[in-house]
Image (spheres, rainbow, N blue to C red):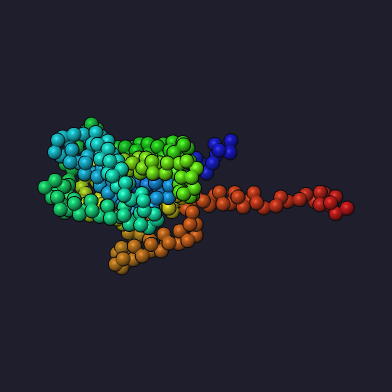
Amino acid sequence: MRQLFSPGRAVLLLFFVAAALLPLMVDPRGHLLRVAAMVLLFAAMAQSWNIVGGLANQISLGHAAFFGLGAYTSTLLFLKLGVSPWIGMFAGAVVAGAAAALLSIPTFRLKGHYFALATLAFAEVMRVIANSWASLTGGPVGLSIPFMGTQPAYFAFRAVSSYYWAILGLLVFVCLVFHLLARGAIGYRLRAVRENENAAEVAGVDTFRVKLTASVISAALTAMCGTVFAQFTFFFDPDSIFSLAGISVRMAMIAIVGGLGTLGGPLIGALFLIPLEEVANAYLSSKAAGLSQLVFGLILIAAILIQPRGIMAFWPKKRRAAKAAPPAVAPAQAAAKGA
């Protein structure tokens, strides 16, 4: 019973119930639903990153590379060959997974900030290649997806609500994958690597293999998010799709603020950060240059300082404090002890 009503599952249930009901209560073509769709998409991206960043503590700053590979693969297949983005989504996942496997061979020997910098460099290399290879990628001009009306077979819809449901389905899938990994044998091995990689090796864990598996799965899921982002926005360029601050750091921060290694953390983090950023941009951008970014950054710093383990850590912390407190002694029992 205690496991049934754990905070992670309660948050997950409330989140998805509210997400499922939202399109029924707002304008299906309005801006509010677009913001909500971006909340769900970044929650899926952060949950994908959470597999390596949360379970294994491999802080990657290069997931924008996999995100961009997914967007470019599916879009180029559609524009050049007429392949449906639904199929291109899985092709992009394969390409990103293969890239993650190749990247893992040299980078898994690195630790801490050296690993983070190596992954960051990979994303930057992909951005430079995409900008330079204009004949294929469109270069700095970017790629535009032609508007096709409502054609579900080609991932094309008129209403924002249709994209919203597709993104919600993707988020459910990513959360399910994370849950199965976290609760399975690979999840326990990844947590062993997170706590002490050397001790995990001594205990018989093939640390390279388990990290490689997690990295490939994480990259593939991130690429699928990239495909959905491309279809939803209709346009992207190398500087936006391979962005360090806009993609890599943002998905990491969402997971960190919400709670690393938890199922509900990326959901809460996205629900907190994405609307906060939208509100800051809407109300503060016109006041002074950079004011919205300054306020958003200060709030983000305050949130991390108040609870470094993430928002999801608040409830368990209070519960542990209540358990640690000494039980109140009844007056009659106190009197009996005094006698």
Q: Which residue lies furthest to the front in this view?
A: 202
Residue 20 appears in the figure: no
Vertical arrangement, residue 61 with respect to residue 101, above or below: below
Residue 195 appears in the figure: yes
Position of residue 40 measured from the top left corner of the image (x, y, whole percent) = 36, 44
Q: Which residue lies furthest to the right in this view?
A: 339
Position of residue 25 measured from the top left corner of the image (x, y, whole percent) = 38, 41
Position of residue 195 measured from the top left corner of the image (x, y, whole percent) = 49, 49
Residue at image position (32%, 59%) is 281
Vertical arrangement, residue 249 with respect to residue 19, above or below: below
Residue at image position (64%, 49%) is 323
Tell me the quarter of the picture where residue 177 sits.
Answer: top left
Residue at image position (25%, 34%) is 86
Q: In which quarter of the image is the N terminus?
A: top right
Number of marks in the rendered image: 0
Vertical arrangement, residue 80 with respect to residue 257, above or below: above
Out of 200 and 175, give the one closest to the viewer. 200
Position of residue 211 measured from the top left corner of the image (x, y, whole percent) = 39, 44
Tell me the quarter of the picture where residue 293 sits.
Answer: bottom left
Out of 161 and 301, give the one closest to the viewer. 301
Residue at image position (50%, 60%) is 306
Out of 95 and 143, give the one closest to the viewer. 95
Out of 169 and 134, give the one closest to the viewer. 134
Q: Residue furthest bottom?
A: 288
Is 254 displayed left or right of 118 in the figure? right
Q: Residue furthest left?
A: 135
